[in-house]
Amino acid sequence: MYTDFLSLADLTTDEILELLELADSLKAGLKAGKREAPLAGQTLAMIFEKPSLRTRVTFETGMYQLGGHALLLEMVTPRLGERESIPDVARNLARWVDGIMARTYSHDAVLQLARHAQVPVINALTDRLHPCQILADAQALREHKGDFQNLKLAFVGDGNNVCASWFNFAARLPLNVTLVCPPGYELEPAIAEFARREARGEVKITHDLEEGLVGADAVYTDVWASMGQENESADRAKVFAPYQVNARIMQLAKPGAVFMHCLPAHRGGEVTDDVMDGPQSIVLDQAENRLHAQKAVMLTLMRKDASGLNRKQKLVACG
Ligand code: CP
Ligand code: NVA
């Protein structure tokens, strides 16, 4: 049983499916005007070392809708761990708040928070992974294309944190995932290897656009230079130019393929306006689902039982 939400690889197939079911029901409930407060009186601390629009707004709004409160910690300068150690930050926060959400550069920073805080920690993006994004995306993909079985998602671009979380997802659910990238921008080998070993569907890495996109039900892309790689932007723009998702590239996929992007997008860079704004694009459904999917994660991890403990506190209490 997971007590933090750090990587989709930490969850079982059933646990991911349960989160998706809960996200669907929270979405339907919200649209039907249902208002409940299962996290009343609870506070989520939000740590951001990097900028955000979607993550910041959806976690704060989500906590509010669940009856709780979210608290923003401005941590951009200095980075987490510079003013005081990460274990000290974790142990202090756990005395006041009921959950911690963190967006950091170093993945190890989030792991350390989770290790030292006796409250649940949620990974809201690190250089390595972005599991909240892929949970919301999976909810959107299922809404548009049905069950993952026999679906193919082609991730066109950098083998980055978002791509890595898709590979983790493919290790748990029967979705076929192919990364189509320029040579030298493949996925972190350990994550690719893990996905290959565990995959229920097919996972592939190719440099060839036609090979990668054939039969794709979803075409996904992300920025060519992630947060923290800004000084590589100009070089990367040259290398990735042939991999821009435009109308010609979309035609290499199945006719009804959806276009996906985690956002923010660099229009004219990794994607053209006509694709972003075209009929195949589901980017705003993905963005909307960040709210519902993360509410499902918070509810699962932070809800307290009759003794007033959440699942992590209960585990710690039981030794
Ligand atoms: N997709 C995503 O995480 O968006 P933000 O960086 O705006 O939070
Ligand atoms: N790969 C991007 C995702 C932004 C949501 C980044 O890390 O900047």
Image (cartoon, rainbow, N blue to C red):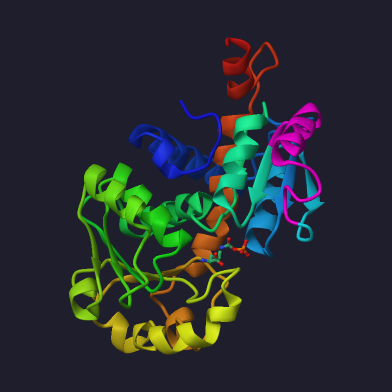
Instruction: Name the residue at 25% across, 47% down.
Output: 174
Q: Residue at x 46, y 49 (%)?
A: 135
Q: Nearer the viewer, residue 20 or 203?
A: 203
Is residue 80 toward the left or the right of residue 257 in the image?
right
Q: Report the image quarter containing ligand 2.
A: bottom right
- On the image, the x and y values in percent for residue 312 come to 59, 23
Whether the magenta-drawn stretch holds residue 96 is answered as: yes
In the figure, residue 253 lies in which quadrant? Answer: bottom left
Q: In the image, residue 55 lies at what x, y percent? A: 64, 56
Residue 64 visible at all:
no
* Whether residue 188 is situated above or below residue 270 in the rendered picture: above
Question: Which quarter shows the C terminus?
Answer: top right
Q: Is residue 157 left or right of residue 261?
A: left
Q: Quadrant of residue 53?
A: bottom right
The answer to whether residue 209 is visible is yes
Q: Quadrant location of residue 115?
A: top right
- Which residue is at 50% across, 62% downward? 285
Residue 230 picture location, percent across and down: 60, 77
Q: Is residue 277 left or right of residue 157?
A: right
Is 80 included in the stretch rendered in magenta?
yes
Which stretch did the figure color magenta?
A: 79-99
In front here: 298 or 279? 298
